[in-house]
Amino acid sequence: MLLAGLTPGCRGVGVLANHAYSATTAFFLPNPIAQIPYMAGFALGYAAALPFTLVAWPLSALLYPQEDGGEFYLSAATAPSILLGAGVGALVALPFVPPGMPFVPPGPAEPAPARGPERTDAEEGGRE
């Protein structure tokens, strides 16, 4: 992972860390029983990877490509902690998912199909 900071893959690692965090939080945080184990595991994994992050941060500061305006810079700089935190959090919370499934709120309803504007009788040629 640290070698990715030395290559143009630095942005790719940032995108990977961002997506890993987004996916795991979207899966575990709506589940009321798995929330606390996930966050505890995430904090444990994040703290365990801090020494690697202290190396990755300066490497990202030096080598992150500036073409995208730094969109994923923070994710790339903290990638070791985010990735290990998301992984440990997911492993810790996974056994708590089935008991919490009945309490997960339903997802967003599918939007109704788009309809055109309502026509009036005058627009249809005056037919009745």
Image: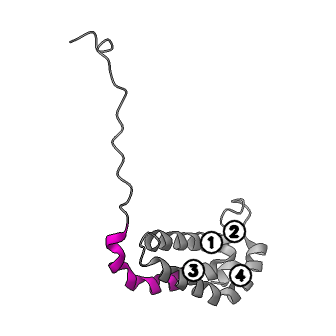
Distance (Cα) linking label 3 and label 2: 15 Å
- What is the x, y in percent for residue 16? 56, 72
The residue that mark 4 highlights is 56
The residue that mark 2 highlights is 73
Three-letter amino acid code at disc 3?
A: Leu
Please report the residue visible at 46 percent of the width from the left and 86 percent of the height from the top. Answer: 92
- What is the x, y in percent for residue 121? 29, 14
Three-letter amino acid code at disc 2?
A: Tyr
Badge 2 vs badge 1, beta-carbon distance below 8 Å: yes
Distance (Cα) linking label 1 and label 3: 10 Å
Instruction: Give the mark nearer the N terminus: 1 vs 3.
Output: 1
Q: Is residue 47 left or right of residue 37?
A: right
Instruction: Give the mark nearer the N terminus: 2 vs 1.
Output: 1
Closer to us: 24 or 71: 24
Please report the residue visible at 28 percent of the width from the left and 10 percent of the height from the top. Answer: 125
- Point out which mark residue 14 bears: 1
The residue that mark 3 highlights is 83
How many C-alpha atoms fall within 10 Å of the one at disc 2: few (<14), some, or many (≥20)?
many
Please report the residue visible at 41 percent of the width from the left and 78 percent of the height from the top. Answer: 33
In the image, is residue 43 part of the stretch drawn in magenta?
Answer: no
Which range of residues does the magenta coloring cover? 86-104
How many C-alpha atoms fall within 10 Å of the one at disc 4: few (<14), some, or many (≥20)?
many
Three-letter amino acid code at disc 1?
A: Gly
How many C-alpha atoms fall within 10 Å of the one at disc 3: few (<14), some, or many (≥20)?
many
